[in-house]
Amino acid sequence: MKLVGNFLSPYTRRVAISLDVLGLPYELESLFVFKAADVVRTYNPLVRIPVLVLDDGDVLIESSAILDEVDQMVGPERALVPANGKPRRRVMQLVALAHGCMEKAQWAFYERRLRKPEIVLESWIEHNETRLLAGLAHLDAVAAEAGAKGWLGGTPRISQADISTTVAFTFANAVRPGLDVAKAAPRLAAFAARCENLAAFKKSPLPAQIA
């Protein structure tokens, strides 16, 4: 398989980590949408990453759809989202919240990155940062319930809730440094640090240079 994207994208990163957690080998085609839009367009008409190209040539787009198919590949016993019932609902709700935090952090980040200074909307940045902090506060409470060794979804092993939440926190911490999210969500910060120390997370690190 080939994963198209880069690890500054939290959506690409959560797919990469998931593949490594499950032991599914892949080749990374590392590129940035703003620098290689024409290349990305050959895979996805929306010009968005990540893209996962399967061994049979099928092309999967959008991280949630990719991760759903990855779970289908490995079967319910290994899947990162429980198959049914309350365990599935809990994990899916946490994944949705983490995904929302990724979006809010990204939109706040992009406002200054993509607009000229004279047309930056500070109110839009504040709007997104306020909602990001609210999402992280909820996840912080979940991390407190999980304790020092538990998993966020209440599962016996790591789930997509843990992967996506950690990726969201690490991304927000990097691109919104002024918010001091580690201080705002200390239990979540400790949980994320624990996950980031795992081999699958270390293999797909957030770039040290955020540009």
Image (cartoon, grey):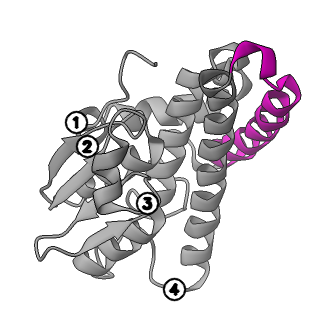
Q: Amino acid at mark 1?
A: Lys
- Residue lying furthest right in this view? 123
Give the amino acid type for the residue marked by disc 3 in the picture.
Answer: Ser
Image spot of residue 126 (x, y percent): 84, 28
Magenta stretch in the rendered image: 116-144
Q: CA distance from mark 4 to mark 2?
A: 26 Å
Dot label at residue 203:
1
Q: Nearer the viewer, residue 132 or 80?
A: 132
Q: CA distance from mark 4 to mark 1?
A: 30 Å
The reply to whether discs 2 and 3 touch (Cβ–Cβ < 8 Å) is no
Determine the residue positioned at 33% across, 82% down: 76
Q: Earlier in the sequence, mark 1 or mark 3?
A: 3
Local SS, label 1: helix
- At horizontal 60% and vertical 35% (from top left) the residue drawn is 188
Label 3 sits on residue: 63
Question: Tag 3's secondary structure?
Answer: helix
Query: Can you identify the residue that label 2 sits on?
Result: 200
In primary-sequence order, the first of circles 4 and 2 is 4
* Mark toward the start of the polypeptide (3 vs 4): 3
Which callout, 1 or 3, points to the residue nearer the camera? 3
